[in-house]
Amino acid sequence: MKGVTPQDPKQPAGRRGGQQAGPITRSGRSRLATTTDQRLLDSRGPNDWVHTDPWRVLRIQAEFVEGFGALAELGSAISVFGSARTRPDHPMYTTAQQVGKALVEAGYAVITGGGPGIMEAANRGASEADGVSVGLGIELPFESSLNEWVNLGINFRYFFARKTMFVKYSQGFVVMPGGFGTFDELFEALTLAQTSKVTNFPVVLFGTEYWQGLLDWLSGQVLDGGYIVPADLDRLVITDDVEHAVATMRAGAADVPSRGEQLLAEAEDRES
Ligand SMILES: CC(C)=CCNc1ncnc2c1ncn2[C@@H]1O[C@H](COP(=O)(O)O)[C@@H](O)[C@H]1O
């Protein structure tokens, strides 16, 4: 083979100037007939590996890398959750638009699931107010794409990778009326807070008529049964007022200790 000199297989690879394959040195009988690049480029080979879990793990990793990369410099942001089915002529669509706008005016980027309905309305309000309007889209079995009001969009294959982004990059949540998807996002936030996986952040239930029933059930049946403690309900604020929702986000964000304050408190805890 051109460029290859016969090697003594008994000599250690390093001393004979063996064949480099990334960090690995091969010589003698361990030499490969082709380079890694050659194998990558020469043949398409079998393709069933794209449906294997190890390959999926790499795709999952890539979603985290892309998400973290795109959102690292976002600054303060609030997530707005709510129904994918709310039509533009519904009063709650207009309200969600006002919420998006008011959040931008208060200095926040607005994050939504990037879909239609309430998500679109909040993105629209944010975008029309010249703010950062983030859409964390999700691949669904039926046709869907990011709404036209998203100006920073990421499309995810995996729900759990996407959900990490909402929590990691938001300082608070405004939850508008919605169905299972909205409940899932609301209760994930509450569970993470309850288990101290995230530090204090405010959650606003927007729309008293819609949410009061849930709140009554939580503070009745659920609390009385001992399934939650009163403090679990403390972070929930229910309102119909856009300014109140934004003020709650502001006040809640101010409650969150800075990383420096956290480290100081941890050091003091260790000393005491
Ligand atoms: C018309 C339709 C169902 C479109 C689906 N398209 C979607 N695109 C992006 N995020 C979504 C979508 N459906 C549900 N979600 C997620 O779940 C929540 C809404 O679900 P739901 O409509 O309340 O249960 C949103 O906050 C969003 O993050």
Image (tube, helix red, strand yellow):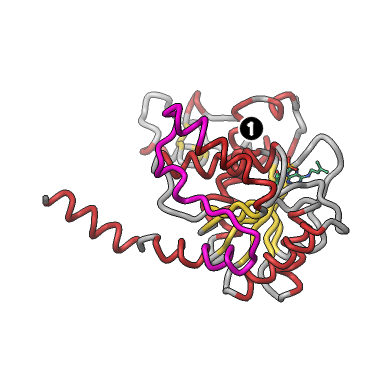
Residue in view at x 29 percent, y 62 percent: 261
Is residue 153 rendered to the left or right of residue 223?
right
The residue depicted at 53 percent of the width and 44 percent of the height is 189
Closer-to-camera residue (130/174) = 174
Return the x and y of residue 66 as percentages of the image width and height.
61, 52
Helix, strand or loop for disc 1:
helix
Q: Nearer the viewer, residue 89 or 170?
A: 89
Say whether residue 134 is magenta: no
Q: Which segment did they paint magenta?
A: 220-248
Quadrant containing ligand 1 reads top right
Callout 1 amino acid: Arg
The residue that disc 1 covers is 56
246 vs 50, nearest the viewer: 246
The number of numbered badges drawn on the structure is 1
Q: Locate residue 219 relative to residue 70 in the image: left or right.
A: left
The quarter of the displayed image where residue 63 is located: top right
Q: In which quarter of the image is the N terminus?
A: top right
Q: Relative to residue 142, is residue 241 depicted above or below?
A: below
Residue 156 visible at all: yes
Q: Can residue 59 be seen in this view?
A: no
Q: How crowded is mark 1: few (under 14 residues within 10 Å), some or many (20 or more)?
A: few
The answer to which quarter of the image holds residue 239 is: bottom right
Q: Does the magenta stretch include residue 228?
A: yes
The image shows residue 146 at horizontal and vertical percentages of 79, 54
